Each structure stands twice: as C-alpha cells, then as structure tokens.
Image: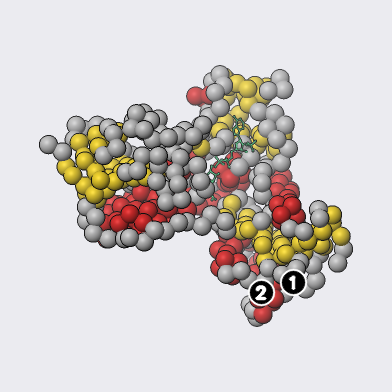
Amino acid sequence: MSDEFDLVVIGGGSGGVRAARMSAQFGAKVAIVEEYRYGGTCVIRGCVPKKLFVYASRFNGLFDIAPTFGWQVDAKFDWPTLLANKNKEIARLESIYEKLLDTAGVTVFHDRAVLKGADTVALQSGKTLKAKHILVATGGAPFKPQIEGAELGITSNEAFHLETLPRTILIEGGGYIAVEFATIFAGLGVDTTLVYRRDKILRGFDHDLRDGLEDEMRSRGIRFRYGYHIAGLCKDGEGVCVSFSHGEEATFDKVMFATGRHPNTDGMGLEEAGVELDQSGAIVVDEYSRSSVPSIYAVGDVTARAALTPVAIREGAAFAQTVFNHAPTVVPYDLIPTAVFSEPEIGTVGLPEHVAAERYHSIDVYVTRFRPMQNTLSDRTEKMMLKLITETASGKVIGCHIFGPGAGEMIQLVAIPMGMGATKADFDRAIAVHPTAAEELVTLKAPSYRIIDGEKTGV
Ligand code: NDP
C-alpha cells in the first residue's frame, strides 16, 4: 500500500519548506521528506550559523577601538562557548521549521527519498509515496577538487563543528565562502591565508569592491597566495602539509576548501525517471521550475540558477502559486541584491561598473569614500565606499555597490527603488538621515567620472 499525495517535496531546506507550506495552504495534500535536519543548508550549516560566527569575529575589531571611547577591555575568546550557543540556536530554528510544516498540515518524513518514476517516491524505510507532483529541493553540497589527500581538508560543513580553533588555516577559493570564512577566522585570532587560482577575489563583482576588500583583509593580517592552487595534501604531525601547484610546500593546522558547491542529484533516480540534468548535475528547469518530466519540478540550489536562500524561497513560493493556486508565477532574476558577510561587509545590487560600461553607451559613476564615524576617534584608516552607477541618458540607477559597516542592511533597501526603476533624481529627492553612512546615497553631487563607449572621461 502506498500513501497518495498531491505533492511530495524532497528536501526540507528553504525552498522545499516554503513550497510545501504554501501548497498545503492552497489546499493540496502535501508530504515532505528530509534525510538530515529540517532547515537545510541555510539554517543548519550555512547563512545562519555563518552570520553568528561573523558577529563573534567582529568583537575583535570593536575591542581594538573600545579604549578610544573610554572602555578598558580585557577580552578572552572561548570557541566551545560559541559552538554550544550556536548549536542551541540552530536546534531552536530547526524545530520551528518542523512546527511550521506541521501547523500547515504537511506530512513530515525523516527519511531518504529516491524517485521511482514520474509519480512515485520510495523512502529508505520501505514506504512508497504516490504523488501527482514531485518537487526536488535537495540543494547542494560543498565540492572538493579531486586531488591527493583531499579528505584531509575540511569544507564549510565541518568548519561549523571544529573541536578546537586552529592556530593557522589555509582557505582555498575566491568566492563568498572563502572570503567570509577568511575574515571570520582572522577575526577570531587564527593566522589565515587564502589561496586562489586567479589574481583577485570575488570574480564578477565590481572592481572597487574587490580591491577594497582585499586591502582591508590584508590590513587585518590575512595573507593572499594568488595564481596557483592546492595540488595535494598529506599529514604532517597534527597539521596538514600542502603541496601547491607551483611546487612550494607549507604546513597549516587546517586546510579548508571553499571551491564551490555542487547540486545534490546523485543516486536520486532522477535520470532513470527521465529528468534532464546539465553538465554540473543540476536539474534543468523552465521558468516555472518544471523539469523535462511534466510532473517533476525543482527549486533552489539543485537547479543552476542563483544559489541564494531568498531566491530558493521565491522559487518555492512561485511553484506553489503556479501549480496549486492557478496563478502562474515566475521569479525575476535580473536585480538580485546580495551581501558578502566579510569584514568589512559588501552589499551589491545591479550591474558592476565593467558590465554597465559594456551594456550602455554612456554611464555616470558616483563614488564616495570616507572613514566610518565609529573609527574617527581611533587611528584606523579604513574607508567605507558607496558607489552609484547611472545610465547617463535616463539617469536611471543601474548599479549600487557598498563596502563597509552595514552594507548588507543598506543594499536591501536600495534594491526597492532600483526595482521600481528609480533615477538619481529620485534618490536625491530623499532627505538625508544624519549622521549615517547611508545618507551619502542621497547626497552624491556630481559624477566622479563618466564612461562613454568604454572610455573613462571626466564630467
Ligand atoms: P563560489 O562559486 O562563489 O566560489 C568558488 C571559488 O572556488 C571560486 O573562486 C572558484 O574559482 C574556486 N574554485 C572552483 N573550483 C576550483 C578548483 N577545482 N580548484 C581551485 N579553486 C576552485 O562558491 P562558494 O563555495 O564560495 O559559494 C557557493 C555559493 O553559495 C555562492 O555562489 C553563493 O551563491 C552562495 N553563498 C552566498 C552567500 C551570501 O549570500 N552571503 C554566502 C555563502 C555562499 P574561479 O573564480 O576561478 O571559478
């Protein structure tokens, strides 16, 4: 005997949970299956614990400037306390996720699911579920390069559970996870080195963000090794000996791979069921998240779209609207604000300068750099940066890039007027909130420079 559902969701992360709850609220009979912990990557071993670690790492910088405000601080850091408190908070959020599903009337399974055709899901425990629709929301997992000794390196998954804080760490990669963890570990006092096969972190981001972050990371003691990669790892006492591709060797207490993430599609019976996968193993979907099999859909990191939690949530919601509320809904991917929770922080939305200059005949670039007010009593030289890019002809704001404290919070709000097509004049109409860093966004006077057909000019 098999249980029958309108929808079986495989994967209890951000996208799957949102889709399950909304579909149930629209009247569908829904089951959800998760083999690990409800909450998925974001809650269990991603955004949420990462941000808690970020907060922990930032006390260091605050203690540095505390004496300039009259505070004398004798601070000591205890890693086990942070881990225990983080684990408690994650467990609390996990139980909330399950409770929300339960309240919505979703049948919750703790099990591993495998597809057995277009309308059947087999659970490892032996149960079979029949479904009119199946939604695959199994996310992704960290990828390690296939090199000798790769098993001696950790990924972000293990970084959340280290028994002791290493004295030294080497992190490979130049993306979000590499720079976020580099500044987390450095902030917690770990001697941190980043190795990246190209010549600058955060490929694809605006060049001022890339340069600004690298400078600040260096000033916090983080070392950069550019232009080569890790070729092999072996044990060296309690540490790990790293052979680099250019022949050098060095030993670190820990080595962490932040070399990207791959979709979780292996061994799920997807191809056997006729679901098309791309070269990276991601599920190929149309604008409504439908796969090559009409009854099977996919949302979140298991598809090769934008690997970001809020995007997965939107895709889950759009799926529920489309399939169970007769309201075909597509997710807009053209203006996704995002933050890198490095120290200092990055917030970015719209086009980076090099892309805007290529796409438009003429753009105006407004850039301002200033010391965050919190640092003005100390001798810290660190600068914050705000940059607005407009199309010259229309004045429309097509890019905004912020580097410094609160950048993530600010960029969320900037994304609203930009989504409405706001111009520089619209920004200027807003009255400044003083004294804040964000006020610079509405008080930028003349462009710093103009780029016409790719040529930088004065204005
Ligand atoms: P990214 O894809 O951002 O970066 C992976 C990095 O690893 C790149 O610098 C890449 O180099 C390098 N790399 C890839 N393969 C190899 C290899 N074989 N050898 C050496 N280096 C390699 O992945 P992340 O793991 O940092 O993050 C995954 C995704 O998770 C992000 O894209 C983002 O969407 C999401 N995320 C978002 C966060 C946020 O919103 N704050 C935080 C963390 C993650 P190259 O540039 O040459 O390709």
Q: Residue at x 33, y 39 (%)?
A: 36
Q: Residue at x 51, y 57 (%)?
A: 332
Foreground residue, 337 or 305?
A: 305
The mark that comes first in sequence, 2 or 1, is 2
**Residue 239, located in which quarter of the rendered image?**
top right
Q: Is mark 2 within 8 Å of ligand 1?
A: no
Q: Is residue 214 above or below residue 264?
A: below
* Other residues around mark 1 within 10 Å, as few (<14) / some (14–19) / many (≥20): some
Residue contact at pointers 2 and 1, CB within 8 angstroms: yes
Q: Is residue 130 left or right of residue 459?
A: left
The answer to whether residue 45 is seen in the rendering is: no
Q: Residue at x 57, y 69 (%)?
A: 420
Q: Is residue 374 left or right of residue 304?
A: right
State the image coordinates of residue 310 (x, y, percent, origin top left). 47, 55
Could you tell me which secondary element the residue under label 1 belongs to? loop
Image quadrant holding the N terminus, namely top left
The kind of residue on which mark 1 rests is: Leu
Q: Which mark is residue 427?
A: 2
Residue at the right extreme, as displayed: 458
The kind of residue on which mark 2 rests is: Phe
State the image coordinates of residue 437 (x, y, percent, origin top left). 66, 68
Disc 1 target residue: 444
Q: CA distance from mark 2 to mark 1?
A: 9 Å
Q: Ligand 1 sits in which quadrant?
A: top right
Q: Residue at x 29, y 37 (%)?
A: 118
Could you tell me which secondary element the residue under label 2 belongs to? helix
Q: Is mark 1 within 8 Å of ligand 1?
A: no
Q: Is residue 250 above or below residue 433?
A: above
**Residue 328, located in which quarter of the rendered image?**
bottom left
State the image coordinates of residue 192 (x, y, percent, origin top left). 63, 38
Foreground residue, 308 or 426?
A: 426
